[in-house]
Amino acid sequence: MNSSEPKQQWLIRLQSFWQTFSKNRIGLVGLAMLALLILMAIFAPLIAPYTSSSSAEFQVGDIYNPPSASHWFGTDDAGQDIFSNFVFGARISLIVGFFAAFISIIIGGVLGLVAGFLGGRWENLLMRFTDTMLVIPDLPLMVVIIALTKPSLLNIIFVIGLLGWTTTARVVRSQTLAVKSRKFVLRARAVGAGNAHIISRHILPLVMPILVVQAVLVVSLAILNESALSFLGLGDPTVLSWGQMLNYAFGRGAMSIGAWWALFFPGFGIVWVVLGLTLLGQGLEQVLNPRLDTHHLMPGRPTVRKDRVEAQTKFTKETVLEVQNLSINYINEGKPPARAVENVSFTLNAGELIGLVGESGCGKTTLMLSLLRLLPSAGQIVDGRVFFNGEDLTTISDEELNKIRWKEISIVFQGAMNALNPVRTVGDQIAEAITRHMPDFPKDKIQARVIELLDLVGIAADHREHFPHQYSGGMRQRAMIAMALACNPQVIIADEPTTALDVMIQAQILELLDSLRKKLGLAIIFVTHDLGVVAEICDKVLVMYGGVTAEYAEVDTIYNEPRHPYTQELIKAFPDLTKPKKKLTSIPGYPPRLDNLPVGCRFAPRCPAVFARCQTEQPILHNLGNSHIASCHLVEASK
Amino acid sequence: MNRTRALLKKIAWSAFTVLFVIILNFFLFRILPGDPARAGIRDPRLKKEAVEMLRVRFGLDKPVINCFESLNPIKVGSCAVNPLDTQFFIYTRNLFQGELGISYHTNRPVADILAERLWNTVLLIGAGQILSIIIGVVFGIFAAWKARTSVDYSAVIASLLVWSLPTFWLAILLLFWGSNNGLPLAGKSTPGSSSLPLIQQWVDIARHMLLPTLTYTIVYMGEYTLIMRSSLMDVLSEDYILTAKAKGLSTFQILKDHALKNAMLPLVTVIAINLGFTVAGAIQIEAVFSWPGLGGAIVEALGRRDFPVLQGAFLLIAVTVIFANLLADLTYSYLDPRVKVD
């Protein structure tokens, strides 16, 4: 029973692998091409119209006869049938490819595993050796060795195999390193498992997939190398490989006679098998090591509503940004769209600071990115409008939007570690924003402006010539704020600017934003999951849960009369200095997954006040007057 | 100061690799059978004096290295011999004096034969590398930028296809095509062209270079396309590209000012690592087009069993590749401000 259990698991893994692989078109085509060739090699005596290439008597025709009914691929310089030789030649290519690759994979795999697993001096030594071998050009070395020994098939296999392991060793080593520090390996070591056990049971299974992909690549390289060696005249004279067929044809006048068939078909065979292996390798790589093939420059999905309207509400002078019933979906092919944000509205006045609060995964960042249409390519604005000074940002052209981005609305991104370009100086990146949006700004004054901006956030002038990696986390965040201020925008979106920073620096940055708002009259949207921060600096609060508005009100209302159970629970979860004896509670459970939202109220599964209606009916937004909004059935009941 | 130390470390490493190649090259030709110099000495027709003369001429009368009289067959000798009087030392000393031995075939010094040929190979690889890198980078940019569109898919499939072509076979196909289009098919220049004016000589060489360079470019551009594509895809999904987009920069500006340099950096390393492999392509191309480079020298030496030339060509190729590798390595650490010098 014990032995059958892991075997079944192994089978299940193989089945799930095949399920994904069978959807990969590139991999399947490669596999089919390879399978066809392997079948041809196995059944060569049945397929070839003339018998084995060594007994020439049955296949002699005229030399260099063009393709005909009796000789599909024509005849060669000895009058032999090229099609028959082609069919048998597949055997040589595959034998050399697979056996040589086998040697390379064993050597490279063992060296990589040992180096990665042992680490320290051994790793250093082995990798230095690998790097040395990697630099030495392999084909000339193969040529020298085979020229000095006998050019037999066995020698060729060994030479290609013994020189082809370097990349495998590197790949396996880095995978071993990555696997070695995983929890279950450390745990196995902690309970006293031996090295052999750890390698065979814990590391090898995770290195194996990469080794398989690598093996496919090594086979194709070995086949290419064999053909090149044979073409250079170093092939085994007793067997006729594709490379050797080309060597004979090229060396014996096929070119001058114009016998293209003698030169074309053997090469076509090599291309077929190598391309098959390459496609198979690509397919395996995509299945075993899937990468998200998306990036920030891919065109976003167009807003569903195309009509442009002027703001319906009369814009008072102080309203800068008005978001109306905004809904955003993430489109997954073959699946229903994930409703990331639904029907969210808020208003931002000049000089106002609004807090956007909620746990991770509640759609806060999605909402902020959508304001400037910066959503990833799967994201789509399906409903609602974003009015900035009366203009609808969801429908204006990209060019118009590019004039508003950063000039009028700038963003301080979460975790500024990667938000700055690592190969350009910080000062240069700030200056770029100025030259982009203020072409009239005097060139000689740009540096002074950069220094002024950095000074504003407390960074010394000489740091402007430094690269982001030379900054501390807090400095990078402040530099980001300086960059956001560069064009005197009306609105700054600060997306969790203080996460991952220590408390002192958090306080500094909050203070900085608050003082800038007062000094420059900025409107700020502050995204956070920290209610303490909100209480300190915000005017209004928008609490989001599962992509919808839970509650929206003035900050005092939120703290003193929260109506939504989620807001109430959030407040309970944060310490209050005025009531030091208050017991802190946390909300059990997690926010809902966007692709699996509950039918009724999204908070129902975690709500302490849940009742029957919450399970089936999604609450609407209830206006409680004085611009206090909450979406809860209880609010309606008490109204 | 740290930077200098890192620099010296890299140079020292390359020097060590060169030393490794020299030692490898020496022992390969001593351990493996097949060197006609030694095979010839075993010829039963030779008189004793003639054998002795040959041994002296090729330096085979000296012990291979301390403790070993010869390595094939293994014959243990005295360890007390003067190390300066061993084949290994003489070989190394000659190397440092720029001597690579005498060709069996032409009796000319190998170094002289190979010197001019090295430049022809460098010319071919240089032109081919530059072209394939430019084309690969451009295709890679388009493929990554237009990711998951038909532009991207065609670029990837085409790259995989050219990657799968055996270099010599593509060379043959192009040679066929060239022979029907009146292009020169062999060598570096038309015989007798040296009497022409300089401009016409250059045009002549360029015409001869066309097909070899084209072969080289096609074979290697696929790989560079794929690498550039995946590198740029990585960069374009970084947070700082989102920042650049939020800054209102146009797609062109983002690619030019924020993505390209970052994406090209890994390419420099790949180009360096690749050099060792691309030499393989050059050898095949030179064999097909009779290009008078090191690869051509290897092919000719193979046919004539001219082992000193073979040995010298291998050494020269290896050392050139190691040197180019060092150069690429240094370029990288110069280009990337993040490379911490420690």
Image (spheres, coloured by chain):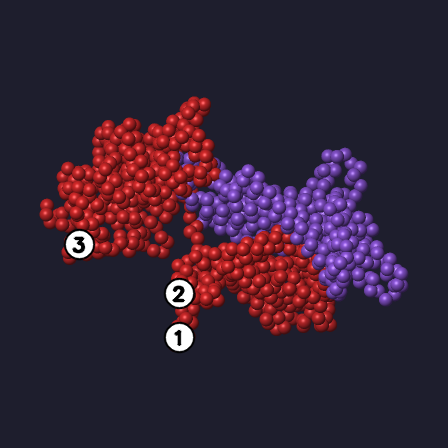
Chain colours: A red, B purple
Alpha carbon separation for disc pair 3 and 1: 45 Å
Where is residue A513? Give x, y as percent: 30, 34
| Residue that appears at 59% across and 55% down | A129
Labels 3 and 2 share a subunit:
yes
Q: Amino acid at mark 3?
A: Pro
**Mark 3 falls on what kind of element?**
loop
User: Which residue has dot 2 on it?
Assistant: A191
User: Which residue has dot 3 on it?
Assistant: A608
Q: Is residue B260 visible?
A: no
Examine the rendered structure and indicate whether residue A548 appears above or below residue A273.
above
Where is residue B146? Give x, y as percent: 46, 45
Q: Amino acid at mark 2?
A: Val
| Residue that appears at 28% across and 56% down | A596
Where is residue A128? Give x, y as percent: 58, 53
User: Which residue has dot 1 on it?
Assistant: A2
Pick the front one: B335 or A40 = B335
Left or right of A219: which side holds B40? right
Alpha carbon separation for disc pair 3 and 2: 42 Å
Pick the front one: A50 or A467 = A467
**Mark 2 falls on what kind of element?**
loop
Where is residue A365? Give x, y as percent: 32, 44
Q: Amino acid at mark 1?
A: Asn
**The numbered mark 2 sits on a residue in which chain?**
A
Q: Is residue A512 visible?
A: yes
Residue situated furthest left in the rendering: A638
- Crowding near the residue tagged with mark 3, few <14, some 14–19, many ≥20 C-alpha atoms within 10 Å: few
